[in-house]
Image: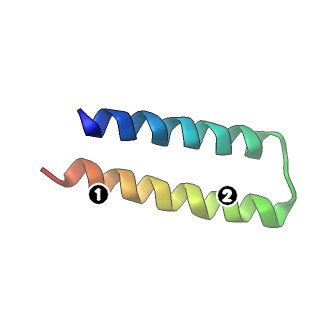
Amino acid sequence: MHYNRSKNAAEMLVGRVWRGQARGSRSQNGAAQQKFLDTLWAASLIVQIRP
């Protein structure tokens, strides 16, 4: 129950960041966003692994 809500929130957040990247922000900003996406991706894997 709680997992689905947080998953949806994460997907919305990723979508927002992704659109920001697609718009072509400054390179430094893009690098920070990519690092954030990688962190979010790793966190989502950890959440999936947990029982």
In the image, taking residue 36 as reference, residue 32 lies left or right, namely right
Q: For the residue carrying disc 2, how many other residues have a C-alpha within 10 Å: few (<14), some (14-19), or many (20+)?
A: some
Report the residue at 48% width, 55% height from top: 40
Residue 25 in the image, given as x and y percentages of width and height = 85, 51
In the image, is 10 to the left or to the right of 29?
left
The residue under label 1 is: 46
Identify the mark nearer the N-term, 2 or 1. Answer: 2
- What kind of element bears circle 2? helix
Three-letter amino acid code of the residue under disc 2: Gln
- Amino acid, disc 1: Ile
- Determine the residue positioned at 58% across, 60% down: 36
Q: Is residue 48 depicted above or below 3 in this figure?
A: below
Residue closest to the far left:
51
Measuring from the top left, give residue 35's x and y in whole percent.
60, 64
Give whichever of 41, 2 is nearer the camera: 2
The percent coordinates of residue 26 (x first, y second) are: 87, 58
Quadrant in the rendering for residue 42: bottom left
Residue indicated by mark 2:
33
Q: In the rendered view of the protein, which quadrant contains the N terminus?
A: top left
Q: Is residue 11 left or right of residue 31?
A: left
27 or 15, which lies in front? 15
State whether residue 24 is above or below residue 26: above
The colour scheme used here is rainbow
Where 9 falls versus 33 (above or below)?
A: above
